[in-house]
């Protein structure tokens, strides 16, 4: 199974993961064989990519750190919270807050029960549903970081609520600015920056039964360790640790998601950027805790190794985010192996990942193999 941009989908490809919208409705199911109609619909809905089952590659299922049902329910919940009527946008429904606590508690349970799983970024969101999926992802990423730091249940619940609601203030930002398909001008960016203070005001209204610290996360998640963030220009330890964790998760998820104005950055690029941000944008200790849970090369990635062999990533061992387990498919001359060779890069350093292959390179490798086969049969 591998991830393919919607623009590169072809009829006959088979869907590898269910795709849902923020209402919890299934848009397309695992196992469906794509045709032109499906592909056109996916493009029209703003679905940026799909996981497909590639019969030329070993078949395996990419696991999420939380189960599909929980993720879909959480996204639907966030939609209900952030997508309310205009008349209620400055007030929170306590029933939804209580549902949020239950949802966060369930996510914590799953993360604690699966301590060996690494984040592989398997969620696929439509452009219009970005904010809802982003909020859930930031919550999951923040909680898994808090668990790595040894937080107790009480701290995790506060962190979870603040991270799930960190972009609450965006409900008061005009949609034409939030969804602008190009760079923001200075005036528009100044409007966007107000969402941090809007979020704090909404969450700290004294009636919603949300801890003040969760509201502070919404206020401070764009502050930066070097003082270059907003809204207050705080620096160093004057920024709460929870806010920094959510800030790290926010940056990583935003970089690795497709947006209306740019394509997603590969996870290894986001990983490298964050790895270099310690004690500059964020506390180095928190960056290390975050990155220890991130697969720089998610399962399903086709990679070229330093040996020039081509392999598919199948799993990343906990604690070795840059050294995944792979199946080598092609030798250093481009010939397809009769049987894949399993290699755990974390146990030997002679081979490393040189680069992630893009769709064009993958198709070129397949074409070369096909030509080699024709030559052998001639």
Image (cartoon, rainbow, N blue to C red):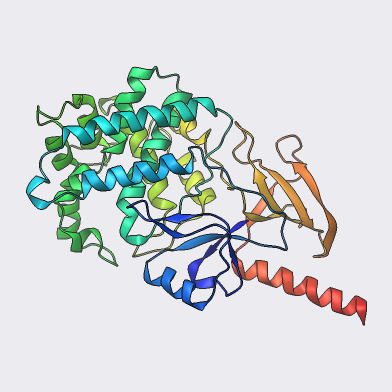
Drawn side of residue 35 relative to residue 182, left or right: right
Drawn side of residue 366 relative to residue 358, left or right: right
Drawn side of residue 301 relative to residue 374, left or right: left
Q: Residue lying farthest bottom?
A: 378
* Residue 13 % position (x, y): 60, 68
Where is 221 relative to 371, above or below?
A: above
In which quadrant of the rendered image does the N terminus lie?
bottom right
Residue 198's image quarter?
Answer: top left
* Residue 95 % position (x, y): 20, 33
* Front one among 89 and 27: 27
Where is 20 relative to 282, above or below?
A: below
In which quadrant of the rendered image does the C terminus lie?
bottom right
Q: Residue lying farthest left?
A: 87
* x 33%, y 24%: residue: 157
Where is 142 relative to 190, above or below?
A: above
* x 35%, y 61%: residue: 127
Residue 308's image quarter?
Answer: bottom right
* Residue 190 % position (x, y): 16, 53
* x 28%, y 44%: residue: 78
Number of labelled discs? 0
Residue 224 seen in the figure = no
Residue 32's image quarter?
Answer: bottom right
Residue 318 seen in the figure = yes
* Residue 232 % position (x, y): 17, 37
* Front one among 258 and 19: 19
* Front one among 141 and 79: 79
């Amino acid at each position: 199974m591998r991830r393919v941009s919607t623009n590169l989908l072809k009829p006959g490809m088979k869907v590898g993961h269910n795709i849902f919208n923020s209402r919890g409705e299934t848009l397309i199911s695992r196992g469906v064989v794509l045709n032109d109609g499906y592909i056109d619909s996916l493009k029209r809905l703003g679905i940026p990519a799909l996981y497909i089952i590639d019969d030329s590659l070993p078949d395996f299922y990419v696991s999420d750190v939380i189960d599909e049902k929980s993720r879909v329910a959480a996204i639907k919940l966030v939609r209900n919270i952030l997508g309310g009527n205009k008349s209620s946008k400055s007030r929170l429904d306590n029933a939804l807050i209580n549902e949020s606590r239950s949802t966060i508690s369930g996510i914590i349970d799953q993360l604690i029960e699966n301590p060996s799983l690494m984040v592989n970024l398997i969620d696929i969101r439509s452009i219009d549903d970005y904010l809802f999926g982003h909020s859930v992802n930031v919550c999951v990423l923040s909680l898994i970081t808090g668990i790595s730091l040894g937080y107790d249940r009480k701290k995790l619940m506060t962190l979870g609520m603040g991270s799930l609601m960190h972009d609450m203030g965006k409900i008061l930002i005009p949609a034409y600015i939030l969804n602008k398909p190009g760079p923001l001008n200075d005036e528009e960016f100044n409007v966007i920056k107000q969402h941090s203070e809007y979020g704090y005001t909404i969450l700290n209204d004294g009636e919603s039964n949300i801890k003040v610290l969760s509201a502070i996360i919404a206020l401070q998640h764009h502050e930066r360790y070097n003082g270059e963030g907003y809204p207050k220009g705080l620096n160093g330890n004057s920024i709460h640790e929870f806010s920094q964790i959510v800030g790290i998760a926010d940056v990583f998820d935003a970089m690795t998601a497709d947006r209306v104005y740019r394509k997603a950055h590969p996870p290894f690029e986001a990983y490298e950027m964050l790895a270099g941000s310690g004690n500059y944008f964020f506390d180095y200790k928190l960056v290390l805790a975050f990155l220890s849970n991130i697969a720089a090369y998610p399962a399903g990635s086709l990679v070229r190794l330093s040996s020039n062999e081509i392999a598919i990533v199948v799993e990343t061992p906990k604690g070795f985010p840059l050294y995944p387990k792979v199946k080598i498919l092609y030798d250093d001359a481009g010939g397809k192996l009769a049987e894949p060779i399993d290699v755990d890069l974390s146990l030997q350093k002679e081979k490393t990942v040189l680069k992630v292959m893009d769709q064009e390179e993958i198709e070129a490798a397949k074409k070369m193999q096909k030509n080699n086969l024709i030559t052998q049969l001639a």
